[in-house]
Image (cartoon, rainbow, N blue to C red):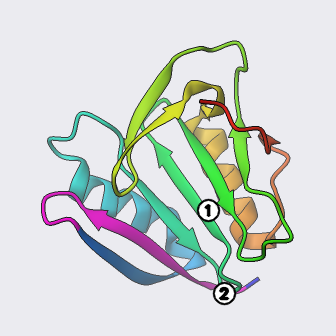
Amino acid sequence: MTNQLTIEYGAVAKHEDLSEEVHADRLLEEIRRIKRRFEDGLDAPYGVDVVNDRGDRMTIGFDEHEGFLMFQPSSDQEWTRYSLGEVKRNDSKVFYLPQWTEVSAKYMVPTPKLLEALQDWVRSGEFSDKIEWTTELFL
């Protein structure tokens, strides 16, 4: 996989789309920096998109406890995939992605595992076995 990635995100107050190139080794550090910059004052966790050189997109939203991943392939030959947590949950969480988005809590996994899964995907381009994945759409 490539070492260069693009992080795409939105400015909450100005409603503008932003992006920046980042080396894979600094990805988590940059995501945390962006979250600190925009999360202040938000009632919901802030999320970003990580785009690889093939155009595949991994949306990540998380707080200190839990979050989700959503993989959107650049090819229409693949399905969108979501992280899968506890399927018995019936609540939802709101994220800023860069618009207010309600996400089923069924997709929520613990933040440490979520970040490991993102790093695995960045390194290999494959879906991490650190979390479960689903193509099922939960509302």
What amino acid does circle 1 point to? Met
Task: Please tell me whether residue 118 is drawn above or below residue 111 in the rendered image.
Answer: below
- The x, y position of residue 26, in whole percent, is 50, 73
Q: Quadrant of residue 23?
A: bottom right
Task: Name the residue: 14% across, 66% down.
Answer: 14
Task: Please tell me whether residue 134 is drawn above or below residue 105 in the rendered image.
Answer: below
For marks 1 and 2, the one nearer the N-term is 2
Q: Is residue 44 left or right of residue 126?
A: left
Helix, strand, or loop for circle 1?
strand
- The magenta span reads 2-15
Task: Name the residue: 23% across, 55% down.
Answer: 38
Disc 2 crowd, CA 10 A, few/some/many (<14, 14-19, 20+): few
- The x, y position of residue 121, in whole percent, is 74, 64
Q: Which mark is residue 110?
A: none
- The x, y position of residue 83, in whole percent, is 70, 42
Disc 1 crowd, CA 10 A, few/some/many (<14, 14-19, 20+): many
Q: Nearer the viewer, residue 102 or 109?
A: 102
Task: Name the residue: 66% across, 31% down.
Answer: 138
Q: Is residue 33 left or right of residue 61?
A: left
Helix, strand, or loop for circle 2?
loop
Placement of the C terminus among the 4 image quadrants: top right
Placement of the N terminus among the 4 image quadrants: bottom right
Residue 108 falls within the magenta-colored stretch: no
Task: Name the residue: 71% across, 85% down.
Answer: 54
Q: Nearer the viewer, residue 116 or 105?
A: 105
Q: Quadrant of residue 13?
A: bottom left
- The x, y position of residue 81, in whole percent, is 74, 51
What amino acid does circle 2 point to? Asp
Task: Please tell me whether residue 65 is drawn above or below residue 115 in the rendered image.
Answer: above
Q: Marks 1/2: CA distance?
A: 12 Å
Task: Give the labeled residue for mark 1.
Answer: 58
Task: Give the labeled residue for mark 2.
Answer: 53
